[in-house]
Each structure stands twice: as structure tokens, then as C-alpha cells.
Image (cartoon, rainbow, N blue to C red):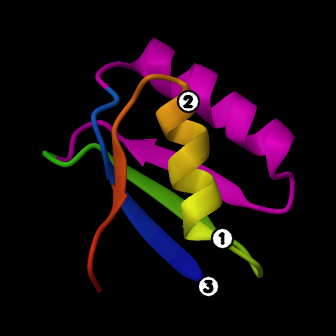
Amino acid sequence: MVEIFKTNIENKKQAERILASLSATFPDLKVNVDLEDCDKILRVEGEAIVPDKVIDFVSVTGHHCEMLPE
């Protein structure tokens, strides 16, 4: 399963911090951020993704995160 989220993560340092925290909190998920994309895409792969938990987690870091429609 793969879920794609639009974020406002602006730079590599922010992305690294958020990805490290996401990986620690959700160790079964594979995560990455595409800062080159205009939507600053957060891509999450795994067996049991709960989109609301990912959105809430990123929001707590002070960043916007929303699921993109398929």
C-alpha cells in the first residue's frame, strides 16, 4: 500500500527531521519526501498505513499535511 501526501516541508533539514521521527514512530513504514515536487510530496509505503495518524504526526511538527486524491 502506498499513500501520497501534500506537505509544506521546505528544506532538507526539515525533511530529515520529520522522516527520522516518522520512521521511529512507525518503524514498519518506508517514508520519503520529494522536495523537488511543487507539492513537497511525502510518500508512505507499508502494509498498514493509517493516513490520519500520518497527517496528525506531521501536523504536530508544525507542518501542513494532506492526502492527495488518487
As for residue 64 lying within the magenta part, the answer is: no
Tell me the SS state at disc 3: loop
Label 3 Cα neighbours within 10 Å, binned few <14 / some 14-19 / many ≥20: few
Checking the image for residue 60, the label placed there is 2
Residue 42 lies, in percent from the top left, at 43, 51
As for residue 33 lying within the magenta part, the answer is: yes
Q: Earlier in the sequence, mark 1 or mark 3?
A: 3
Name above or below for residue 32 compared with residue 51. above
Residue at 85% over, 62% down:
28
Q: Given this view, does label 2 or label 3 mark the residue nearer the observer? A: 2
Residue at 64% over, 57% down:
53
- Label 2 vs label 3: CA separation? 24 Å
Q: In this view, does 19 lie to the left or right of 61?
A: right
Seen from the viewer's position, the closer of residues 41 and 60 is 60
Name above or below for residue 69 compared with residue 17. below
- Label 1 vs label 3: CA separation? 11 Å
Q: Which of marks 2 and 1 is nearer the N terminus?
A: 1
Q: Given this view, does label 1 or label 3 mark the residue nearer the observer? A: 1
Label 2 Cα neighbours within 10 Å, binned few <14 / some 14-19 / many ≥20: few
Per the image, the residue denoted by label 1 is: 50
Instruction: State which region is magenta.
Output: 10-37
Q: Which of marks 2 and 3 is nearer the N terminus?
A: 3
Tell me the SS state at disc 2: helix
Give amino acid for label 3: Met
Label 1 Cα neighbours within 10 Å, binned few <14 / some 14-19 / many ≥20: few
Give amino acid for label 2: Val
Per the image, the residue denoted by label 3 is: 1
Give amino acid for label 1: Val
Residue 22 lies, in percent from the top left, at 70, 41
Residue 60 lies, in percent from the top left, at 56, 30
